[in-house]
Structures are given as C-alpha cells and as structure tokens.
Image (spheres, rainbow, N blue to C red):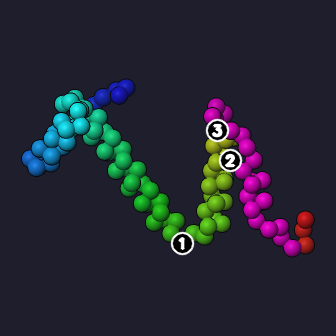
C-alpha cells in the first residue's frame, strides 16, 4: 500500500471470529487482516461494476458489443505511452464479417 488510510468498521462477532479463524488456519497473521479486507473490497467493487455494465448492455447485439470493444481497444492503443501492442483491430473485425454485396 502506497498511502494508507485508517478505517473504523463494525462487524458482528460471528464474522470477526470466522475471519480471524480463517486467517489463522491459512497461516496469515493479524496484520494481514487489512490486506484481506482490501482484496475483498476490490473484488466486490469489480463484481458490482461488471453487474451494472451487464445490465446496461443487456439489450445490445453481439455485433454492437464487439464494435464497442474494438473502438475502446483502438483508442487505448492510440494513447501516448500505451503499452498495448498497436495491432489493427478493425482488420480482424472485417475479416470476420462478410463483405456487403456490391462492394469488394
């Protein structure tokens, strides 16, 4: 942790005993409680964020989703200092879709 802040949280005795027992059984020490909580919060935030995104995109077609992903990846690759390889995403997308009639 680069910069820590102190939290005061209140949990039931049952959760406290269960968590401390788990930490002791897995060889973790008292100081690892903060690390455990931080990891749990990260997972929960990720879970809630992905659930919200899934709900927003529930009615979106597969092709539209792929276009959104391709555009986001292309924008990320175009940013200065990006560590993503600069591959042509649009070229792969075109290869997967049949060419419109009358054009080739």
Other-residue count near label 2 (Cα within 10 Å), few / some / many at <14 / 14–19 / ≥20: some
Give x and y (percent) for residue 100: 83, 70
For the N terminus, the quadrant is top left
Mark 1 or mark 2: name the one nearer the start of the chain.
Answer: 1
- The disc label shown at residue 74, or none: 2
Q: Which residue is mark 3?
A: 84
The residue singled out by tag 1 in the image is 59
Q: Is residue 39 left or right of residue 6?
A: right
Q: Please name whichever residue, 3 or 23, is drawn nearer the observer in this view of the structure.
A: 23
Q: Residues within 10 Å of mark 1 (few under 14, many from 20)?
A: few
Can the viewer see residue 90?
yes
Residue drawn at the location 38% of the way across and 56% of the way down: 48
Whole-percent x, y for residue 74 in the image: 68, 47
Distance in Å between CA atoms under marks 1 and 3: 30 Å
Q: Magenta region's main secondary structure?
A: loop
Q: In terms of secondary structure, where does tag 2 sit? A: helix
Q: Which residues are magenta?
A: 79-101
The quadrant the C terminus occupies is bottom right
Crowding near pointer 3: few (<14 within 10 Å), some, many (20+)? Answer: few
Q: Is residue 16 visible?
A: no
């Amino acid at each position: 942790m680069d910069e820590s802040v102190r939290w005061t949280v209140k949990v039931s005795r049952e959760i406290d005993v269960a968590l401390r027992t788990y930490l002791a059984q897995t060889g973790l020490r008292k100081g690892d409680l903060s690390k455990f909580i931080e990891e749990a919060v990260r997972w929960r935030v990720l879970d809630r964020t992905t659930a919200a995104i899934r709900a927003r995109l529930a009615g979106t077609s597969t092709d539209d989703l792929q276009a959104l992903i391709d555009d986001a990846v292309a924008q990320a690759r175009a940013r200065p200092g990006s560590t993503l390889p600069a591959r042509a995403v649009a070229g792969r997308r075109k290869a997967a879709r049949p060419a419109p009639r009358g054009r080739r």
